[in-house]
Amino acid sequence: MTIRVLLADDQALLRSAFKVLVNSEPDMEVVAEAADGAEAVSLARSERADVVLMDIRMPGTDGLAATRMITADPELSAVRIVMLTTFEVDEYVVQSLRAGASGFLGKGAEPEELLNAIRIASAGEALLSPVATKGLIAKFLAQGGSSDTDGDQDGPAYSERLGALTAREREVLVLVGGGLSNDEIAERLEVSPLTVKTHVNRTMAKIGARDRAQLVVTAYESGLVRPRVE
């Protein structure tokens, strides 16, 4: 199946470069281009892209606001968003994950990294680039970088969702927050990768997470995983 990609960036030259790269792959194609966030939201609705490569900083409606609009639309629940940023150590990175993005990638990434990012996001996995790892999220949260856009995270509804998790699901959530893959979790818990996948999917459903990236943030914000600052 061909992965349908939407490019959202205010730099036409960069979009052209990404388009050539993406269209060179047999399993993906660029179906639309947007120069700002508002256009990205509109095209996401009309073109039904599988993955949106979204620049964080754009004029007018920025990538963060556009991401919130897309992830809040039930009809676009299958759309995955990869945020593109020039500076990976950035508070907007964590905010974008909270907004529903599957992950983020620096604009200076190698071509193969970008293509791999599209495939990972399309598969519903979390994408954290080598520089922007879970450690960055932990450090940001430890420094009090919680976004006020998600003020209900610590509210009763949030606690209720966590309380709905079984002991094993909480254990899996902690390991996901620790950056382990399904195979690594399976080895740690001495179960099959398929069993781990089932636990991950059930955990996402119970806490209302779109994908694995949301689980990483939840693990830190809930206190199940303690931030460690170097």
Image (cartoon, rainbow, N blue to C red):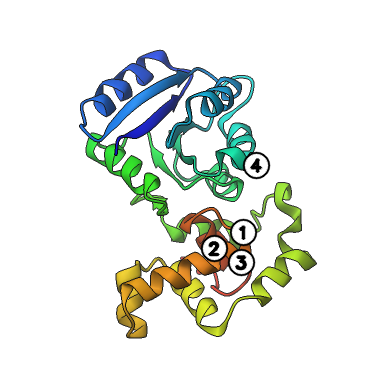
Is any part of residue 138 visible from this angle?
no
Callout 3 touching callout 2 (CB < 8 Å)? yes
For label 4, the SS is helix
For label 2, the SS is helix
Q: Which residue is mark 2?
A: 204
Callout 1 touching callout 3 (CB < 8 Å)? yes
Name above or below for residue 23 compared with residue 78.
above
For label 1, the SS is loop
Callout 1 touching callout 2 (CB < 8 Å)? yes
Kindly identify the residue that appears in the image at 48 percent across and 32 percent down. Answer: 54
User: Mark 2, residues whose alpha carbon is within 10 Å: few (<14), some, or many (≥20)?
Assistant: some
Kindly identify the residue that appears in the image at 25 percent across and 37 percent down. Answer: 110
In the drawing, does residue 15 fall left or right of residue 220? left
Picture quadrant of residue 73 = top right
Q: Which residue is mark 4?
A: 72
| Picture coordinates of residue 157, whole percent (x, y) | 76, 65
Label 1 to label 4: alpha-carbon separation: 12 Å
Label 1 to label 3: alpha-carbon separation: 6 Å
| Picture coordinates of residue 57, whole percent (x, y) | 54, 28
In the drawing, does residue 75 fall left or right of residue 180? right
Q: Amino acid at mark 2?
A: Met
In the drawing, does residue 90 fall left or right of residue 129? right
Q: Residue 12 — which label?
A: none
Label 4 to label 3: alpha-carbon separation: 17 Å
Q: Which residue is mark 3?
A: 206
Q: Residue 208 — which label?
A: 1
Residue in the foreground of this view, choosing between 33 and 54: 33
User: Mark 1, residues whose alpha carbon is within 10 Å: few (<14), some, or many (≥20)?
Assistant: few
Picture quadrant of residue 51 = top left
**Image quarter hosting the N terminus:** top left
Kindly identify the residue that appears in the image at 25 percent across and 26 percent down. Answer: 21
